[in-house]
Image (tube, rainbow, N blue to C red):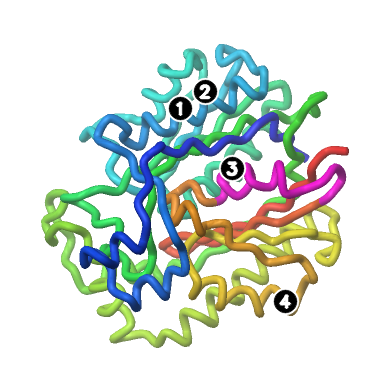
């Protein structure tokens, strides 16, 4: 068991609606329908991904009561450009929040980055039972490199930072207890984000903004969508079942099962799949956030601190390109 001292989502104040994006031609009616969301947070140029992550980390550290100087490990995950070339954003975040003695490490697992960082932090804490770990994510999706509305059709990308403070030993005011975690992958699907493109010598050599619809179209020209769906749903069942087993929790004892914030089609895909193995209420919390890059899992954990009553348990399911899927089972302390 790993203890979540605090977990926080930090959103910029500015919001844009999908209705506005539809009205000015940034989205089609089909894309809006596929998303199923209504509005998203949008950061200005003064709030790049690492700054969003640092803001979330300050909030989580303040809520936890943990002295940043005591943090031994800081893992930062992201999907989109962090603002500088040949530079380490986790070191920046550690310095900005006062974690000067922490070991800062970057984690690149696309949309499953926050989940991967959480699993790595769990392992580190088992080896350092007196230590404290911080996991952060931060993404800002903007032109010219990425079009939040059209780079991945029907999947609306939004800007946010998330952060979580973890410890091995229980504390008097823990937000959650992480009871079990499990991951699975299918590397044969990595081509969905590569397509037929040759390897490049520099960023955006294949053109800007990034067009994931193009790479996915090329991938599915050689592979069936049904094969992807079969793999994704099978891995989803696997990781949720394994996380519950490691937690020692019956699947029907879960109150909620939260999905990644990637739209209506994903909800329609996974809800019946999870309905086969658990009576938990399947939720998509993305209506007013959109997809938060590497941060969906941590944002969902933050939501569970208010959704769950004392002693109640839930699962969070997540996935990301490559492909990798992760599930965590948590409990709100009594």
Q: Please tell me whether residue 305 belongs to the stretch shown in magenta.
A: yes
Q: Which residues are magenta?
A: 297-312
The first of marks 3 and 4 along the sequence is 3
Whole-number angstrom distance, CA of label 3 to CA of label 4: 26 Å
Residue labelled with disc 1: 55
Task: State the residue position of label 2.
Answer: 58
Give the residue drawn at x 44%, y 56%.
290
For this view, does 204 lie left or right of residue 31? Answer: left
Q: Earlier in the sequence, mark 2 or mark 4?
A: 2
Q: Which residue is mark 3?
A: 118
Magenta stretch: dominant secondary structure? helix
For the residues labelled 3 and 1, the Cα–Cα distance comes to 19 Å
Residue under circle 4? 275
Q: Position of residue 191 (x, y in %)?
A: 33, 70
Circle nearer the viewer, 3 or 1? 1
Residue closest to the eye, 104 or 216: 216
36, above or below 285, in the image: below
Q: Is residue 134 left or right of residue 175?
A: left
Please give the name of the residue rendered at 47% of the width and 18% of the height, measured from the top-left corner: 97
Q: Residues within 10 Å of mark 4 (few under 14, many from 20)?
A: few
* Pointer 3 or 1: first along the chain: 1
């Amino acid at each position: 068991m790993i203890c979540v001292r605090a977990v926080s989502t930090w959103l910029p104040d500015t919001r844009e609606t999908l209705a506005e994006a539809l009205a000015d031609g940034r989205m089609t009616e089909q894309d809006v329908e596929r998303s199923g969301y209504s509005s998203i947070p949008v950061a200005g140029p003064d709030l790049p991904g690492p700054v969003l992550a640092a803001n979330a980390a300050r909030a989580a550290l303040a809520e936890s009561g943990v002295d940043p100087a005591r943090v031994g490990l800081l893992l930062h995950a992201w999907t989109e450009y962090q603002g500088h070339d040949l530079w380490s954003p986790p070191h920046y975040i550690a310095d900005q929040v006062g974690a000067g003695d922490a070991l800062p490490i970057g984690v690149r697992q696309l949309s499953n980055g926050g989940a991967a960082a959480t699993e790595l932090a769990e392992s580190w804490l088992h080896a350092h039972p007196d230590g404290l770990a911080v996991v952060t994510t931060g993404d800002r999706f903007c032109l010219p490199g990425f079009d939040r509305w059209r780079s991945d059709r029907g999947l609306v990308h939004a800007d946010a930072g998330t952060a979580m403070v973890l410890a091995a030993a229980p504390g008097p005011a823990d937000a959650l207890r992480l009871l079990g975690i499990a991951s699975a992958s299918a590397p044969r699907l990595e081509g969905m984000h590569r397509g037929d493109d040759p390897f490049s010598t520099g960023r955006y050599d294949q053109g800007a903004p990034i067009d994931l619809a193009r790479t996915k179209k090329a991938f599915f020209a050689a592979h069936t969508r049904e094969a992807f769906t079969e793999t994704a749903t099978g891995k989803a069942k696997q990781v949720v079942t394994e996380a519950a087993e490691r937690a020692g929790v019956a699947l029907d004892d879960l109150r909620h099962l939260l999905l990644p914030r990637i739209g209506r089609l994903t909800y329609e895909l996974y809800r019946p799949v999870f309905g086969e193995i658990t009576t938990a209420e399947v939720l998509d919390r993305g209506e007013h956030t959109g997809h938060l890059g590497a941060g969906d899992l941590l944002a969902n954990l933050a939501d569970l601190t208010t959704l769950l009553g004392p002693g109640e348990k839930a699962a969070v399911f997540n996935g990301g390109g490559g492909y990798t899927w992760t599930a965590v089972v948590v409990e709100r302390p009594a």
